[in-house]
Amino acid sequence: MASKAPIYLDHAATTPCDPRVVEAMLPYFTQKFGNPGSRNHRYGWESEEAVDTARAQVAALLGADEKEIIFTSGATESNNIAIKGGAYMYEKAPAGSASRGHIVTTILEHKAVLDPVKRLMKEGFDATFIEPGPDGIITADLVKAALRPDTILVSVMWANNEIGTINEIPAIGALCHEKDILFHTDATQWAGKMPVNVEKDNVDLLSMSGHKIYGPKGVGALFVRRRRPRVRLQALVDGGGQERGFRPGTLNVTGIVGLGKAAQIAKDEMDKDATRLLALRKHLEQTLVTRLDSCAINGHLEKRLPHITNVSFGFVEGESLMMAVSEIACSSGSACTSASLEPSYVLKGLGVGDELAHSSLRLSLGRWTTKEQVDHAAERIIASVTKLRTLSPLYDMHKEGIDLSKVEWAKH
Ligand SMILES: *Cc1c(COP(=O)(O)O)cnc(C)c1O
């Protein structure tokens, strides 16, 4: 018997392409295959026009000018161009200092920000990694306290991919502008889900990705501000000068058309999707916390994206929980996706203990998630956690009212 496809609750990892996006892309694989750089014939013009349309669609989503949009291969590349390209362009060694300049970022960032910053540290830049409080919010005050006279770049993600918390981006941007510091935000989880206006939000550089917003994989965009201030970046790759030289190479026309269409749909349907998903997520959380004791939602309870929740379940073992809920495609706080046995650095960064970080699930809903799916998933989780706890002597002690933190464990 073929097993049923698991319920997909991992939209923070990737989303399926919207069929309207696929439809928009199809002609550009076959009939309309021209290189947008070909200036002498219709094939080229046709592709160039399609890229221009997509650029306008992405710009409209962000409240930006078309000239400020650079197409890339995804948010990882956008982050690299922004952070490394920005650091190399604006580096300044204060008198008497060995450092090439100071960068402020946070411990909650995606690896696609942390690793470029760590690379820069090896190359002689300094960096501060801000730690949030237990609510996981990066505030403007936290950023202010981390700034130094030699700070050249601040990079703070808009919303966190593991817990969905929302940082104080407009206020952090205002602070950076006041101090003439370049401000980048990894908005991969935010843009296309929630409103962006790069002017009002005081953003200089913004990364986003197609496949997180119902577009194709392998395409993304970087917003590079052109006025007040005009941001300059050192290119990381040399070539044919496409994308104002920031990202040379023949454009991924099909992918770009898909990203543009995804951006247009996102802009039109964002309010509707967000309202529906918020109600669904609250329903899911309510079901879990009312029916199970010793479970906790990670991160700030209000300042969160509508569609992501991250829940820790006490008295169950992480790996067993993941196996027990194999009917649900979701992510866990234990890093079974990576080679390490370390629990999620994001949850640890909030002060969640190793045990609870391991036994956490990230459930992220999407455009086609139904109430039936959410109810079914909740029942599976409740049944699995309840069953696993019958195997836990610690849970028995907890039920008997023994304070486990006061128990003196025998030393081995
Ligand atoms: C998915 C994700 C990325 C990486 O995006 P790609 O387009 O896959 O390179 C970067 N940052 C955040 C916050 C993400 O969620």
Image (tube, rainbow, N blue to C red):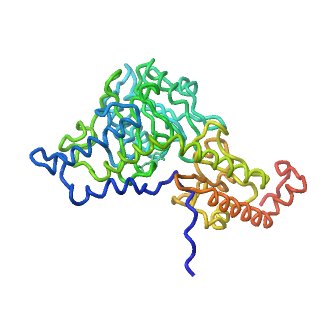
In the rendered image of this protein, does residue 136 appear above or below residue 339? above
* Viewer-proximal residue among 90 and 258: 258
Residue at point 36%, 53% (across, down): 218
Side (left or right) of 96 relative to 356 = left
Q: Residue at x 63, y 67 (%)?
A: 323
Residue 188 x, y percent position in the rendering: 46, 43
- Where residue 213 appears, x then y in whole percent? 45, 48
Q: Quadrant of residue 32?
A: bottom left
Of 142 and 202, nearer the camera is 202
Decide which of 140, 119 is in the foreground and name it.
140
Q: Quick one: quadrant of the C terminus?
A: bottom right
Q: Quarter of the image for the N terminus: give it.
A: bottom right
**Would residue 211 appear left or right of 172 to someone viewing this image?**
left
Query: Does residue 53 lie above or below 334 as drawn?
Result: above
Q: Is residue 305 depicted above or below 400 in this figure?
A: above
Question: As drawn, which residue projects farthest toward the left?
Answer: 40
Residue 23 position, x and y percent, is 35, 56
